[in-house]
């Protein structure tokens, strides 16, 4: 029975013809084949609505292939896509490559080889024949020989590797099925087959149709959107001729204007791309031009129109469609905006398993068990939802790992097991892989996936929400992938690194299928089998729609023509990409019956200008002049919508907030709660460093010294460097002081003491968790300390270091606190880095070590540098020494001389700045002023007077805690 073609333009009642014929054959249990899963559901409802509930079976083309295999009695399972890629990877690894070596290392090369081998299989070109054709082609130009030999070797290696699996790839399997049916046509039993909605057919699909119609003798009816001579269908002219060559009869259906509620849409369908147009039509609010200032603004503009149609015009959501040619990249944005606008939509997209919470945890677990994973991957596994009853345990591990420099999973695991339980699950997974490879690993991961999936729902029986459904899909996809890989021969199974990368790159669907009550969001070519009342075509930009042609990875059309001519093969030539894109656009604009919206954006969200697609101009040529130049616009960065246009109350509130005068966020206020002020008022002892921090910025003191949040990162390097420098200098100078002190003659001994102290205490004061950085930081510190000792040996001071790291004021300290008032209500504690005394042991100079800079006495009060002055008062009152100077000593930087305050006549040989020399009265006045500043600071602390000081807060200026402070300068 010949093939029957039903042709005609869009909306020419082709579906009615096909469905009527299918209903008429209901007694023979015909198959109705449609392109997509969504189409299957739609046409099942369509048939049921016409009274055909039973009899006609609706399937996708894959369902037709399964039915063919079942009836032909061809056993065997085909290679899955994942298995085929592993076969290709093995073939690539087994082939010696030079010309293709660089390309073979790219991630997409195995998939490209699978696709090329599948193309040869669909054309029934066996590998030896293809190799012979390549050699005939290469004989015409010796420069082609290396490439031809390598490509042929890859195709042969792929076939040999596939044969090791005992399975065929899909083209091989389908062609075997078709050959079996050609040998025994009665196996099909004459079941009619009806195909609707296919604008293109692969060679394998044409082979199926040819076999059913001509070899088996089944009734085959195929609808094809096509009109001879029209530019819109140029991409399908060859297909039309090929189908006629199969002996098809043709039923040509004319255009039916009654399908359209808006005549202008019929006008667009009939004249799109035509060179001569008699009349231009009025859009009549049925063809909208929409321009967004940016990508998000465009989506928001369309979403607002869709919301209006649903709310005000009562259009059912399932009669509205949104199409985007580049949906793979824009689906997350479209989904986000539609959710924000409360538009029920079916945004079906894929996401990598490694980008989901459960998938990231499973992949991290595999890497930690089988590879030298990082500490971050161990944390990713531990943070899998539900794995830890106390998620804060993972946070504490991260903090400790960062502080201790644990960079590998093994190091982080050791830290975990010091405080928590053993992570034996990693050992069990590693043992399973060693025992049975991927197959045993699959069983172990299956159990772990089930445990992790159920973990957040312990002792409950919930109905999965969207997040739970995604986790279930991820678990199923990982289990399926491991099961498929485990079915391969051991030599084709991936190693640990490849396995982890494979699992990470698996894709799962996010979102729901199109259906009742939801707006369909899809690609233009996926909507060709159904009509809608309103359609919005987004992303009409050059480079997006029409999409640029994809380069063929192995053989371009010129090479294919040459090979065909040299060998007699019929390698498929790629169609004119622009004509295909024009057909997709025609299919989209012909789908709506009442409203067509075309949208584009003038710039990216970063402000880079973009170019509107010429497809918009093709429609503009059919409408009155000026239509495309006067679109509805939404500015880049616009927030919300005015009240009468707002799709939701939330969007109206956003617009109102954006339109209102900007409000200054409240700056952090004073402490007023008794619970906060009480401990501060009752406290009597304060450290000099605390008061310095308060003087620099009260908010900084509040965060760092009062709240004391636990750090997630190692202590700042300058802080640890300073502690190590203090310890090394204490050891070196105290050792030297015990035997006569530091002098130029003893510098070699001083250098040796510095090196020995550095070696002894470097691990106690770990400057950086990074081993490479640690080595360089220790070397820089050693150089700085040696340079300082060289300066100190020649500084000319008559005073010698006698006391180091002198602690006072706290209960465990050897010296009491300094009383700064008469009633003992304010006492000072601290730690003095070094005290140098004269030969009599009465006069003293106090040293406080700094990094690269030191503050002169003239700016102590201005910059809140109170510490050295308060230490001078403590030395006098607590130690009974007479302070003749107090100096901040830089240990790095270009200037080694200290800064501070020294009596004019004290220690005359000391290398000091002249401006730091003071008369006794001036020094006493300065010390008294610093003591008063300390009393004022404590009074402000006890009053809770938090006042931001952003100019002096951070080390280099600016606010260190802007989210807490919220001051204007932050």
Image (spheres, grey):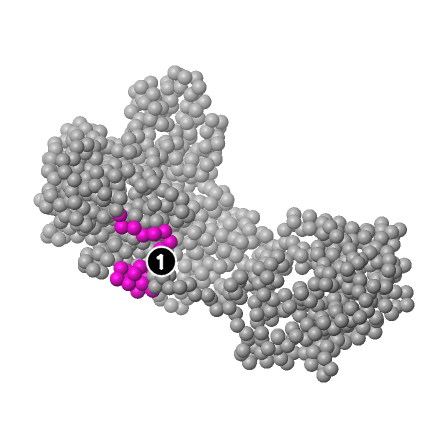
| Furthest residue toward left | 24
Q: Evaluate whether residue 628 shows in this view.
A: yes
Which residue corresponds to the image point at 36% horizontal and 51% vertical from the top-left?
A: 636
Q: Position of residue 66 (x, y in %)?
A: 25, 42
Q: Which residues are magenta?
A: 631-653
Q: Is residue 805 left or right of residue 239?
A: right
> SS for tag 1?
loop
Quarter of the view holding residue 241: top left
Q: Position of residue 36 (x, y in %)?
A: 25, 45
Q: Evaluate whether residue 444 shows in this view.
A: no
Q: Position of residue 592 (x, y in %)?
A: 19, 47
Q: Please determine whether, in this image, residue 881 is positioned above or below residue 851.
A: below
Q: Position of residue 847 (x, y in %)?
A: 78, 63
Decide which of 369, 112 is in the foreground and name it: 112
Task: Write down the residue under mark 1.
Answer: 639
Which residue corresponds to the image point at 42% horizontal and 38% vertical from the top-left?
A: 108
Q: Is residue 11 left or right of residue 355?
A: left
Q: Is residue 727 left or right of residue 565?
A: right
Decide which of 147, 14 is in the foreground and name it: 14
Which residue corresponds to the image point at 18% horizontal and 46% vertical from the top-left?
A: 283
**Main SS, magenta residues:** loop
Decide which of 464, 711 is in the foreground and name it: 711
């Amino acid at each position: 029975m010949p093939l029957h073609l039903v042709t005609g333009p869009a909306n020419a009642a082709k579906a009615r013809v096909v469905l009527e014929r299918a209903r008429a054959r209901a007694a023979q249990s015909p198959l109705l084949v449609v392109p997509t899963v969504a189409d299957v559901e739609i046409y099942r409802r369509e048939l049921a609505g016409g009274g055909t509930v039973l009899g006609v079976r609706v399937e996708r083309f894959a369902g037709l292939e399964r039915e063919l295999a079942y009836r032909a009695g061809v056993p065997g399972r085909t290679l899955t896509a994942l298995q085929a890629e592993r076969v290709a990877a093995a073939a690539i690894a087994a082939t010696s490559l030079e010309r293709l070596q660089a390309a073979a290392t790219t991630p997409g090369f195995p998939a490209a080889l699978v696709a090329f081998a599948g193309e040869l299989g669909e054309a029934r070109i066996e590998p030896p024949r293809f190799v012979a054709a390549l050699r005939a082609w290469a004989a015409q130009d010796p420069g082609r020989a290396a490439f031809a030999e390598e490509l042929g070797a890859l195709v042969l290696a792929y076939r040999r590797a596939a044969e090791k699996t005992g399975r065929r790839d899909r083209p091989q399997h389908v062609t075997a099925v078709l050959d079996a049916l050609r040998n025994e046509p009665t196996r099909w039993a004459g079941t009619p087959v009806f195909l609707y909605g296919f604008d293109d057919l692969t060679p394998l699909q044409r082979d199926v149709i040819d076999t059913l119609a001509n070899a088996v003798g089944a009734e085959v009816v195929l609808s094809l959107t096509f009109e001879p001579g029209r530019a819109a269908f140029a991409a399908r002219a060859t297909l039309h001729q090929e189908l006629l060559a199969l002996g098809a009869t043709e039923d040509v259906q004319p255009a039916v204007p009654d399908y359209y509620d808006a005549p202008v849409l019929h006008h667009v369908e009939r004249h799109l791309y035509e060179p001569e147009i008699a009349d231009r039509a009025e859009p009549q609010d049925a063809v909208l031009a929409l321009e967004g200032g940016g990508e998000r603004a465009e989506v928001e503009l369309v979403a607002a129109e869709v919301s209006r149609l649903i709310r005000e015009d009562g259009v059912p959501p399932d009669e509205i469609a949104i199409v985007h040619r580049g949906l793979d990249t824009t689906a997350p944005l479209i989904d986000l905006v539609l959710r924000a606008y409360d538009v029920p939509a079916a945004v079906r997209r894929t996401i990598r398993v490694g980008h989901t919470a459960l998938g990231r945890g499973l992949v991290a677990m595999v890497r930690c068990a089988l590879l030298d994973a990082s500490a971050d991957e161990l944390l990713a596994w531990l943070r899998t939802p539900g794995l830890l009853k106390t998620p804060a345990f993972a946070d504490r591990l991260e903090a400790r790992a960062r502080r201790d420099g644990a960079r590998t999973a093994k190091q982080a695991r050791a830290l975990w097991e010091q405080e928590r339980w053993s992570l034996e699950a990693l050992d069990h997974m590693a043992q399973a892989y060693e025992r049975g490879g991927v197959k045993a690993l699959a069983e172990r991961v299956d159990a772990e996936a089930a445990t992790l999936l159920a973990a957040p729902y312990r002792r409950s029986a919930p109905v999965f929400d969207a997040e739970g459904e995604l986790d279930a899909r991820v678990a199923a996809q990982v289990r399926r992938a491991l099961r498929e890989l485990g079915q391969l021969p051991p030599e084709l199974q991936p190693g640990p690194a490849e396995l982890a990368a494979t699992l990470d790159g698996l894709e799962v669907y996010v979102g729901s299928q199109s259906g009742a009550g939801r707006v369909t969001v899809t690609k233009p070519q996926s909507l060709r089998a159904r009509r809608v009342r309103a359609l919005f075509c987004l992303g009409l930009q050059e480079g997006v729609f029409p999409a640029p042609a994809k380069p063929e990875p192995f053989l371009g059309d010129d090479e294919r023509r040459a090979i065909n001519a040299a060998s007699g093969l019929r390698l498929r030539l790629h169609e004119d990409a622009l004509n295909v894109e024009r057909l997709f656009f025609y299919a989209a604009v012909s789908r709506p019956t009442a409203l067509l919206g075309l949208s584009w954006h003038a710039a990216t969200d970063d402000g880079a200008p973009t170019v509107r697609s010429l497809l918009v101009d093709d429609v503009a040529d059919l409408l009155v002049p000026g239509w495309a130049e006067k679109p509805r616009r939404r500015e880049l960065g616009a927030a919300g919508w005015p009240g009468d246009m707002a799709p939701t109350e939330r969007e109206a509130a956003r617009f109102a907030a954006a339109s209102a005068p900007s409000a200054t966020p409240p700056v952090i206020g004073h402490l007023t709660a008794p619970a906060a002020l009480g401990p501060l008022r009752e406290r009597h002892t304060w450290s000099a460093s605390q008061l310095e921090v308060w003087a620099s910025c009260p908010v900084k003191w509040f965060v760092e010294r009062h709240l004391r949040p636990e750090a997630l990162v190692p202590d700042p390097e300058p802080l640890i460097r300073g502690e190590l420098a203090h310890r090394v200098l204490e050891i070196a100078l105290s050792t030297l002081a015990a035997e006569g002190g530091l002098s130029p003659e003893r510098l070699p001994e001083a250098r040796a003491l510095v090196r020995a102290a550095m070696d002894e205490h470097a691990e106690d004061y770990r400057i950086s968790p990074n081993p490479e950085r640690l080595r360089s930081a220790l070397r820089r510190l050693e150089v700085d300390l040696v340079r300082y000792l060289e300066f100190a040996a020649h500084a000319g001071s008559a005073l010698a270091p006698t006391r180091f790291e002198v602690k006072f004021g706290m209960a465990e300290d050897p010296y009491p606190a300094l009383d700064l008032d008469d009633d003992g209500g304010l006492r000072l504690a601290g730690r003095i880095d070094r005290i140098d005394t004269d030969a009599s042991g009465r006069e003293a100079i106090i040293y406080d070590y700094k990094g690269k800079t030191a503050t002169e006495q003239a700016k102590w009060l201005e910059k809140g540098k109170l510490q050295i002055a308060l230490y001078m008062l403590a030395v006098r009152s607590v130690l009974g020494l007479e302070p003749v100077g107090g100096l901040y000593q830089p240990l790095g930087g270009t200037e080694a001389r200290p800064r501070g305050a020294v009596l004019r006549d004290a220690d005359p040989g000391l290398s000091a700045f002249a401006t730091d020399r003071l008369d006794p009265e001036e020094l006493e006045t300065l010390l008294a002023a610093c003591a008063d500043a300390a009393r004022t600071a404590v009074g402000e602390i006890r009053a809770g007077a938090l006042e931001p000081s952003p100019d002096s807060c951070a080390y280099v200026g600016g606010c260190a805690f802007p989210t807490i402070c919220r001051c204007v300068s932050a």
